[in-house]
Image (tube, rainbow, N blue to C red):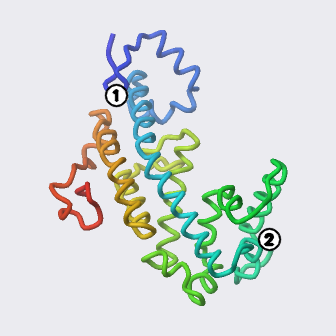
């Protein structure tokens, strides 16, 4: 009987068979492929994927909450309590329905159904990450970036670069939420540089609030470091991407805890 180094669980053949059935062969396919059809090592890799996903929950939580509150505050300050009802007038260059306005309407209907009165706070809490990403699209650049400079004050890069970073973070968040493998891009299955994703989350969070970024990094960097470097030793891509703690805060200008 062999032991799983990541999960430290004593598998026997009956347990392996049962797990393959409960998790489904389709879900385990990519893990088995990378493990060269070794069922035990495939489950070992599956455990590691869950562990590293868990280590990213706190950074993603801090980023998502801070992002929506920061963007919503900017919208409130400029357009008032009912800013979310003015989205159609803020979008340029694209005809047809307004996806962001539609998401607001769905949030309103959901709140009303639950007996709540739609308002700034309840709308902000009810709208998905994708809504805030949507406000970074080119159609909003004129009104929210150039004309009023609202988001150009909030983010330290161009709209295009900011959108790209938020989109990458959102995809990682959704992969984790849907219990998918995150050490590869899904569904392309190309290896993902998760340490770069961690750094990207902290970087964007630092734009929004340096103190919150420091707090989140302090509480999550160690867990991420241990999870990332705890990957199965046979995963060759992992050996090329190992990271280590910084010798000092000055070792990396964009991070208190990491040397990338």
Q: Mark 1 — residue?
A: 6
User: x and y percent of residue 241 in the render?
Assistant: 28, 49
Residue that protrudes farthest toward the left in the picture = 247
Q: Answer left or right for 250 relative to 142.
A: left
User: x and y percent of residue 40 in the render?
Assistant: 39, 21
Q: Nearer the viewer, residue 237 or 109?
A: 109
Which badge, 1 or 2, is on the more N-terminal residue? 1
As drawn, the label of residue 97 is 2
**Residue 257, quarter of the rendered image:** bottom left
Q: Which of 19 and 151 is in front in this view?
A: 151
Is 34 situated above or below 64? above
The residue that appears at 30% across and 36% down in the rendered structure is 230
User: Which corner quadrant holds the C terminus?
Assistant: bottom left
User: x and y percent of residue 136 in the render?
Assistant: 58, 73
Is 178 situated above or below 103? above
Q: Answer left or right for 195 relative to 26.
A: left
The residue that appears at 37% across and 14% down in the rendered structure is 10
Q: Are marks 1 and 2 in contact (CB under 8 Å)?
A: no
The local secondary structure at tag 1 comes to loop
The residue that appears at 61% across and 65% down in the rendered structure is 132
The local secondary structure at tag 2 comes to loop
């Amino acid at each position: 009987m062999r032991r799983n180094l990541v999960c430290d669980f004593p598998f026997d053949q009956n347990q392996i068979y049962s797990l393959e059935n409960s998790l489904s062969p389709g879900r385990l396919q990519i893990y088995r492929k990378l493990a060269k059809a070794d069922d035990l090592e495939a489950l070992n890799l599956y455990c590691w994927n869950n562990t590293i996903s868990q280590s990213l929950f706190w950074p993603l939580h801090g980023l998502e909450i801070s992002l929506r509150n920061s963007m919503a505050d900017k919208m409130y300050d400029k357009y008032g309590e009912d800013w979310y009802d003015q989205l159609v007038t803020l979008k340029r260059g694209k005809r047809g329905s307004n996806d962001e306005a539609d998401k607001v309407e769905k949030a309103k209907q959901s709140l009303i159904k639950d007996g709540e009165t739609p308002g700034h706070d309840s709308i902000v809490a009810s709208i998905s990450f994708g809504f805030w990403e949507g406000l970074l699209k080119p159609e909003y650049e004129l009104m929210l970036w150039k004309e009023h400079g609202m988001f150009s004050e909030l983010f330290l890069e161009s709209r295009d670069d900011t959108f790209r970073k938020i989109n990458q973070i959102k995809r990682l968040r959704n992969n984790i939420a849907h219990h998918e493998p995150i050490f590869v891009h899904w569904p392309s299955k190309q290896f993902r540089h998760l340490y770069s994703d961690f750094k990207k989350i902290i970087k964007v969070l630092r734009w929004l609030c340096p103190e919150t970024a420091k707090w989140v990094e302090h509480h999550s960097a160690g867990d991420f470091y241990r999870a990332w470097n705890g990957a199965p030793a046979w995963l060759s891509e992992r050996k090329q991407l190992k990271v280590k703690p910084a010798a000092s805060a000055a070792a990396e200008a964009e991070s208190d805890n990491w040397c990338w």
